[in-house]
Amino acid sequence: MLLPLLLSCASTSEGFWAQAGSLSCSRYEECEKSGFEDQYDDQAECREEYADYAADVMDCLDEGDCEYDPDDGADLLADYRKADCNDRGDEFNDITDVYKCDDEISFGLCIAGF
């Protein structure tokens, strides 16, 4: 029953980012509790910061004319959820499998801050 709920949450780009923020903050607190507590007062503060970051990324995705793939988004979230704390590396920060961009240059420049 949980899997269909997770898939529905990741069915849109906005849902993907909301789910990713919630999961990222939960895993951060779980895997690096002292670092989490040094940076945030609670989960709500972490999620708010992640939402601000996600809004910026989504603006860049729009600029790069990127299309979200809900199956790949759900897979990425499921893999991150199941990953051992030591395996939460950069591969989960790479969204190139989740989005296909018509203008990768504009997207890349936007993400880089140009």
Image (cartoon, grey):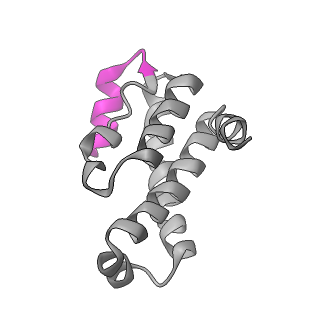
**Residue depicted at x 25% and y 44%:** 90
Nearer to us in this view, 51 or 44: 44
Residue 110 in the figure: left or right of residue 24: left
Residue 110 on the magenta segment: yes
Q: Where is residue 113 in the image (x, y as percent from the top left)?
A: 28, 46
Question: Residues in magenta?
Answer: 100-114
Residue 55 on the magenta segment: no
Report the quarter where the C terminus lies: top left
Question: Would you say the magenta stretch is mainly helix, strand or loop?
Answer: helix
Asked if residue 59 shows in the view, the reply is no
**Residue depicted at x 48% and y 70%:** 46
**Residue depicted at x 42% and y 80%:** 40
Q: In which quarter of the image is residue 100?
A: top left
Residue 114 in the figure: left or right of residue 51: left
Asked if residue 91 shows in the view, the reply is yes
Q: Position of residue 49 (x, y in %)?
A: 47, 66
Nearer to us in this view, 82 or 93: 82
Q: Position of residue 63 (x, y in %)?
A: 45, 30
Determine the residue located farthest toward the top in the rendered image: 102
> On screen, 43 above or below 98?
below
